[in-house]
Image (tube, rainbow, N blue to C red):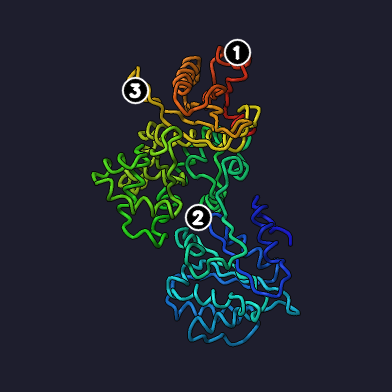
Amino acid sequence: MDKPVGMFDRDFEWEELVRFASYAGAEATLGVVSGRRRQGKTFLLDGLCRAAGGFFFAASEATEAESLRQFGAALARFEGRRAPYRFAHWEEAVSELMGLTGPGGAPLVVVLDEFPFLAKASPELPSLLQRALGPQARHESGPVRLLLCGSALSFMGRLLAGTAPLRGRASLELVVPTLDYRLAARFWELTDDPQLALLVNSVVGGTPAYRREFVLGDTPAGLDDFGPWVLRNVLNPGRPLFREARFLLAEEPDLRDTALYHGVLAAIAQGNHTRGGIAGFLERKSTDLSHALTVLEDTGMIVREPDAFHGKRSAYRIVEPILTFYHALMRPEWSDLERPGQAPAVWERSQATFRSKVIGPHFEQLCRTWTRWYASPDTLDGQRTRVESGTVPDPTAKTTHEVDLATFGRDEDGREVLLAIGEAKWNETMGLGHLQRLDHIRTLLRARHGVHAERTRLLCFSGAGFTSDLRDLAHRDPTVQLVDLDRLYSGD
């Protein structure tokens, strides 16, 4: 089956779906497809059904009776029946569904898109599918290749977990991710201008729908057009990106107290990355936030990252850039932004906030991504196993140093070693002073028990470039690596 025309990348996902759909066994099989909204899951599965001649049903938020009517009508149309099915309950519908076959009894792909909507109205549905996919019943059913798809990550994560009815039944668990920053640059056709690509990525990330449906293909014509592009598409109350961050929370079924969740996201976006810092920003007790933080993690909106040098410490980071942009820059100015014509003034006075709260932290995260997935073993003098940020105490100076990235690997004896530490500056030309700071931190780490930093390299990342003396030093010394935007986007 050929990948649909117009589908960007997704080669791995398509190959896995085709493998699942092409299984020749006579028994029914189950696959689960999940991922955050706007990533193209429906496009993928609809393309699979078209290529394989399968049945695709897109559920809507409806009562059980209405969902059954919609399902019965869609199934009848697929089979070419004049009259729709009249199912009294889902047990009948599942029985009919699992008896489907392709031409000549061949396997048939069946997709239930937005499955959480169906399960919300009919909580017994996963159990009914479990029974239909059981060791005996699955051989009595047709060779259905059933795919359940959903964007509610917390629900989809529980679908196959622990004691859930469908635990152990799936032969495919596919997560459709956002495009990483390099793929996003290709998708937005900005590979010739990495600075512009990074600026756009800091606002909309790698979500495919934001490139097509949400901005109708409007791409910044150049660096000078980035600000006007933001005004046209993100700060414009007439465009869908304007309220997208609010809708992302509203669409998650587990997020009921949206004011609290927005508050937590705002705290993180403003630079409060610890639980205590978030609690202080919201003027609440730290223990009051446990549930909200867990739910936001489960929905994939935030991630908790351990401190590279303190196992008991961690920091929270917003995963979706549009959420950071909204909570750092738009939410505090919402009353002005809702009034047409005020966006240029808001954007003008928010430049410092954009640099410090949006693009700066995003640049640091992309530098960690580059080090984790794109930097070569020659660059790091070894194979990395993890890349994290961290803090290093300096007892003599009575201060603490923040390390933007710390890269760990293993030596020939299997011992964990610190391959590299790095600093990232988006809007600052880096010189020997920055390198000396990193060298001082490396000295502190070498003195710490349990940290093997004898061969630790120093990485400098800059969006503004490097001084000539730093470049000369790095040219002579391979333990100093300089990473500019070109290398970040196309080098190793």
Lower position in the chain sequence, tag 3 or tag 1? 3
From this view, report whether residue 169 is shown above or below residue 102. Answer: above
Q: Nearer the viewer, residue 80 or 467?
A: 467
The label on residue 36 is 2
Instruction: Residue at 56%, 28% (x, y): give it.
Output: 419
x, y percent for residue 180? 57, 44
From this view, report whether residue 222 is shown above or below residue 400. Answer: below
**Distance (Cα) linking label 1 and label 2:** 45 Å
Q: Amino acid at mark 3?
A: Thr
Q: Amino acid at mark 2?
A: Arg
Q: Nearer the viewer, residue 269 or 201?
A: 269
Give the residue number, with chain letter if any, for mark 3. Answer: 399
The label on residue 412 is none
Element type at mark 3:
strand
From this view, report whether residue 249 is shown above or below residue 192. Answer: below
x, y percent for residue 290? 33, 51
Q: Quadrant of the N terminus?
A: bottom right
The label on residue 472 is 1
Query: Cβ–Cβ below 8 Å for labels 1 and 2?
Result: no
